[in-house]
Amino acid sequence: MKDQTFLKTMVKRVGARRALEIGTFDGTSALAMAEMLPDDGTLITCEINPGLAALARKRLSRSPHGHKVDVRVGPALEILPTLAGQFDLIFVDADTRNYVHYYRRGLELLAPAGALLLDNTQGMTLGAVDPAADPAIAAILELRRLITADRSITADLVPVRDGVLVVTKAPLA
Ligand SMILES: C[S@@+](CC[C@H](N)C(=O)[O-])C[C@H]1O[C@@H](n2cnc3c(N)ncnc32)[C@H](O)[C@@H]1O
């Protein structure tokens, strides 16, 4: 089982009132984040699989924090353009091959003092690999190139879950 402590800490650290998740699965991480949101806080979570979305909704309905969570069904690539306003915390945990798109759109949706989290980014530390062998690896390598070149953000790879990249809009200099 994955530890949800890091996500909970991040919700508290940025004082999140409005959060976004890509990749709901059974709602475990959504519920963990919802528990840390204020009672009028909200989390939109996107899930491509209708069966999993239904399972997550069922679990959430049994929690006193479930009312904060809005499960949207469909490909995140189609849901993200429909979202407006700013999010204090964005957690990306699905569809690695489209991480560059989620990174770019995530920065557009991220509040100035918010944090964008990308899970499964341990591959950022990979040395020489063949991007042609796996689109997910290619996406991670492209993400690393973008982040290295972007002086307007700060990024840290935290060794929790499957390697979480924490991106904020606070430049170092
Ligand atoms: C790693 S699981 C998410 C786990 C969840 N965040 C947690 O920690 O409890 C990834 C989920 O994303 C969903 N998914 C995959 N591709 C997607 C896409 N393009 N848009 C939305 N959801 C997607 C999968 O069906 C799966 O349920």
Image (spheres, grey):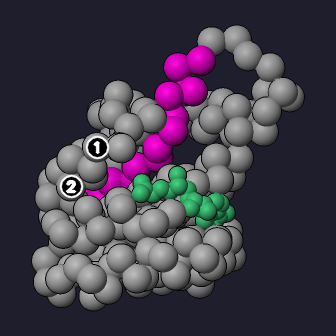
Choose the circle earlier in sequence order: 1 or 2.
1
Q: Amino acid at mark 2?
A: Lys
> Which SS class for mark 1?
loop
**Quick one: 64 or 151, which is closer to the camera?**
64
Q: Which residue is mark 1?
A: 3
Q: Position of residue 78 (x, y in %)?
A: 68, 76
Type of the residue with mark 1 = Asp
Q: Which mark is residue 46?
A: none
Query: Is residue 62 toward the left or the right of residue 30 in the image?
Result: left
* Residue closest to the far right: 132
Measured as percent of width and height from the top left, residue 108 is found at: 50, 65
Q: Is residue 81 visible?
A: no
Q: At 18% across and 69% down in the image, what residue appears?
A: 35
Q: Which residue is at a point 36% across and 44% down the rendered structure image?
A: 1
Question: Relative to residue 109, is residue 3 depicted above or below?
Answer: above
Q: Are marks 1 and 2 in contact (CB under 8 Å)?
A: no
Residue 156, compared with residue 118, is above or below; it is above
Find residue 16 and report its horizontal and vertical position in percent. 22, 67
Magenta segment, which residues?
A: 113-126
Q: Which residue is mark 2?
A: 8
